[in-house]
Image (tube, helix red, strand yellow):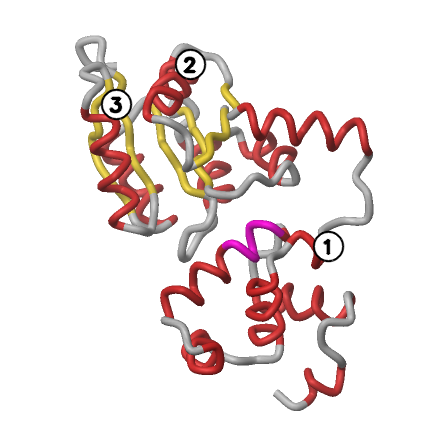
Amino acid sequence: MTNGRIRVLLVDDHPVVRKGISSCLARHEHLLIVGEAADGHEAVAKAKELQPNIVLLDIDLPQMSGLVVAEVLRKELPNVRVLILSGCERAEYLPRMLQSGARGYVLKGASPEELAKAIETIAGGGCYFSPEIARLAINRVVQGNGEGPDPEDLTDREREVLVLVASGLSNKEVSTRLDVGVRTVETHRERIMCKLGIHSVAGLTRFALAKGLITLRDELRR
């Protein structure tokens, strides 16, 4: 820490999100944003350069996922503590997240006060999980792992997007088919991947095939 201030590196691929988080944290004088990064490789480079106390890290990043970044930082910068920031309530992330060395998981819908508390807790050597994530984790233990993600976890529109993406359509093609903006399709796709815990088009295709949302014939037409 510098003069009692907690040095924070903010990592998210959406500039608007980074600006919003920076604005939220600016009201806390003891929290200092020392830098920002938009992808996994930049996050590692900036962490090595700036030596922050905390890396506030989105899970879904271009080039290198947030969990991989956390693993790299654990090995190469053990004094830097990682707080995962995500828009997804997925208890499935917890085992891998803990293995990666991350010390907490906060939802993007958290209040500025909760985010500040999470940063303070982790900087002080503790761990922090949003109440929603803690509840999901407990339910997962009580109920067992079940049979994995289910299409019913998705909204009707998300299932539409899943089928089209798994059938080989690009984001632009999906936007044309559904008469929505490309950014809207990208947002749906991000949410689908978060909810299902799947982070590649190939994985989405396998899931859609396994659940009968598309047929092998549809896949062979690609």
Which residue carries the number 3 mark?
7
Q: Position of residue 141 (x, y in %)?
A: 77, 28
What range is drawn magenta here?
A: 191-195
The nearer-to-camera label among 2 and 3 is 2
Q: Position of residue 181 (x, y in %)?
A: 36, 71
- The foreground one among 84 and 211 is 211
**Are circles 2 and 3 on residues that touch, CB within 8 Å?**
no
The nearer-to-camera label among 1 and 2 is 1
Which residue carries the number 2 mark?
121
Residue ranking furthest to the bottom: 221
- The foreground one among 112 and 222 is 112
Q: Secondary structure at mark 1?
A: loop
Q: Report the predominant secondary structure element of the magenta stretch.
A: helix
Label 3 amino acid?
Arg
Q: Is residue 123 left or right of residue 50?
A: right
Q: Earlier in the sequence, mark 1 or mark 3?
A: 3
Which residue carries the number 1 mark?
150
Q: Quadrant of the N terminus?
A: top left
Label 1 amino acid?
Asp
Q: Residues within 10 Å of mark 3 (few under 14, many from 20)?
A: many
Residue 192 in the magenta stretch? The answer is: yes
Q: Quadrant of residue 9?
A: top left
Label 2 amino acid?
Thr
Q: Quadrant of residue 98?
A: top right
Residue visible at 33% across and 51% down in the picture = 13
- The foreground one among 131 and 167 is 131
